[in-house]
Image (spheres, coloured by chain):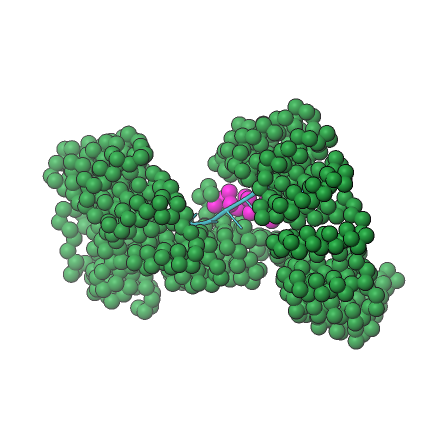
Chain colours: A green, B cyan
Amino acid sequence: MSSSLTVQCSLLPSCALHHHDQTPSTKAANFAQIPSWVSLKFTAPSINTSQIESGQVENVHLVSLSKQGKLKEARDFLKHMNEAGVSVSPQSYKCLFEKCGLMGSLSDGKFVHDWLRKTIKSPPEFLENDALQMYCDCGSLSDAQKMFDEMLHKNLVSWVIIISAYAQKGILKRAILMFSHMLESGIRPNSSIFTSLLRSLTEHSLLELGKQIHSYLIRTGMNSNVSIDTSIANMYVKCGWLEGAKLVFDRMADKNAVVWTGLMVGYTEDEKLEEVLELFAEMVRKSVEVDDFVFSIILKACAGLEDLIMGRQIHGYSVKLGLDSEVSVGTPLVDLYVKCANFESACRAFERIHEPNDVSWSAIISGYCQSGKFEECVKIFQSLIRKGVTLNSFVYTSIFQACPAIADVNLGTQVHADAIKRGLVALLHGASAMITMYSKCGRLDFAYRAFESIGKPDTVAWTSIISGYAYHGNASEALRLFHRMQDSGVRPNSVTFIAVLTACSHSGLVTEGKQYLDSMSCVYDVEPTIDHYDCMIDVYSRAGLLQEALELIKGMPFEPDAMSWKSLLGGCWIHRNLEVGKFAAENLLQLDPEDTASYIIMFNLYASSGKWEEAAVFRRMMAERNLRKEIGCSWITVKGEKHRFIVGDQHHPQIEQIYSKLKELSISFREAEDSLLTEEDVLNGFPERREQLLDHSERLAIAFGLISTPSNVPIVVFKNIRACKDCHEFAKHVSVVTGRAIVVRDSSRFHHFELGECSCRDYW
DNA sequence: CTAGGGTTAG
């Protein structure tokens, strides 16, 4: 232990913590191992004390506490150090101020500042500036201004801090006023103050101030300096004035890779990705030295364009320069291959990275998620947690997406708890993914609580919860939320309307649906797309208004796509309309011959009107085209363990009890007489002869739930395909005779069965 | 000075 302590101490001065990290880095974890009872009078004989300055261990511990964000403990420890006569190093103060600012803890920051003033008569100027920065970071400009006014030794940095703070807060007049005060007070601005100042101008509203600074620099002849011009160009990029940036850029005699990168970032943000490729080509032509930053941005552009060919060329170039194993190049490479749906290459690129960081991990984990490898995605995440690897909020979003895919709400809840512990849950992107996770895992109640816990939900969060209610078949609540969203001043976007129209469609709200579609453009300023028209076709079709649906298909301002015909076809099946069905299926088969829906519905439409020969054609076509992708199955989680069933399953250890339960339940239940072909039958091989539907996977799972869970909890069953009509009726029946609530999530939505009724009101 | 990862839908 003694030697390791010495090593850790020597790490201290150079150990910089990444500012964006919310969690301790792996290096900081070493400091964290120093116990809080660390001796204040350090006299252990085994330690070679001559190598350790007095107070060094205590200061290491103090830094450790502050880096972990344990500010309360740090305050206590300051007192202990004082009592023990150990002095606090400037480095420790610096760390404390930074962390207080980062965490926005004004009270802790003030305490530390008071402590500093109390214990050191004339603190070094840089510490004063750190305290000033802390007040600004905590958002208290009044405290900052007060301190600034009292400061005896204001230097250039002090001015930059306060002026930047006003600029960032959008208090421009004050920032400019302070700037002129600075000039009056005889401070001679050097180029670094301008680069710092310009760096703080990061949004459109600060463009004017940026222009003023720019013109000041021209007037005083301070431009035409590479670093100043670079800063100006990048300021214009960040303030959204790309043309201005380009003007400055074009006039620069010497251009470094930095300004090229900055400009490419600007074009990327403007979604002008082709131009980014051109700029890169120009860089190569002009033999500008490219660095890893250049690769980051150019690879991002390739990823955005899904241009695998160009991406591979640039990948090759980076290998030639020996840069592909750098995180800054390897990570965007991983993302490029993920976005181009080339998971194998993504893995290879990842393995080349020398020291993957949190960003690299989130890129590869998102890759697992996006290529449907949900189980592996979660396993990797769990192993990273076990190893104590630093992760950030981005990873959680991927995990929240994986949870509903593997239908594991327990896992989702654990991940949620873990994210709370790390203080990563408040970030809005993750919160929306979390709402969706809960709703897709069957816990709309938790989804709503998660939604409520967000202080100011944005459009995406609102859309998540509205979709949740639509998905669970509660249209009125979905629409109520949609209006609440507008009342709170949040504007709907294109996806919000998909959710709203879906809610209408699942509840037969035809008039409302049409009104929403028609008002999108003029009232909400959201242009409808083919997807919205498809939703409306679905509304008409489900409601049995097939002619209206057909007219909309013909009259809409888009060419119908596969979804248009699929929605119509679905309606034809619900309302048994063979004529329109034939027309819809012909079109759907042309646009997407792989979609099994056309075959199954057409088979059933013909079969139900007694035309068995015609029906057989579709069955044969489907068999010939070998359209069986995945096996239809259902599963239920009991005591944390997943039990999976397929049709006619005999493998479960309790299979006898399951079947006898099913027989018992079937006594009073009559199967539908025209027994039809279901998706489950098709996916699991065509049955030659239709027998009882007793052994459909959904029923096996429900029966198992009945015999293995307490009677007061709902039975939650997941299946990977759509519920068949008979099983749907069966579930209703079971909910009556057993009095149990049953929840079934099929491939498209949730069904809540209670006392013989389903929340979908037989629309699905 | 400059970079890389994510959210809502049928």
Tell me if residue A358 is in the magenta stretch.
Answer: yes
Q: Is residue A724 left or right of residue A464?
A: left
Tell me if residue A130 is in the magenta stretch.
Answer: no
The furthest residue to the left: A610
| Residue A76 horizontal/vertical position (percent) | 71, 72
Q: Is residue A618 above or below residue A635?
A: above
Which quarter of the image is occupied by the N terminus of chain A? bottom right
| Residue A532 horizontal/vertical position (percent) | 33, 43
**What residue appears at the point 72 percent right and 52 percent down from the top-left corner?**
A179
| Residue A56 horizontal/vertical position (percent) | 81, 63
Q: Is residue A549 left or right of residue A467?
A: left
Q: Is residue A523 above or below residue A442?
A: above
**What residue appears at the point 25 percent right and 58 percent down from the top-left corner?**
A758
**What residue appears at the point 25 percent right and 32 percent down from the top-left corner?**
A587
User: Which one is in front, A176 or A732?
Assistant: A176
| Residue A185 horizontal/vertical position (percent) | 79, 55
Q: Tell me if residue A488 can be seen.
A: yes
The furthest residue to the bottom: A83
Q: Is residue A593 above or below residue A380?
A: above
Q: Tell me if residue A101 can be seen.
A: no
Q: Quadrant of residue A128?
A: bottom right
> What's drawn in magenta, residue-wise?
A357-369
**What residue appears at the point 78 percent right and 53 percent down from the top-left corner?**
A184
The furthest residue to the top: A285
User: Which one is in front, A763 or A554?
Assistant: A554
Question: Secondary structure of the magenta portion, mostly?
Answer: helix
Q: Quadrant of residue A685?
A: top left
User: Which one is in front, A125 or A735?
Assistant: A125
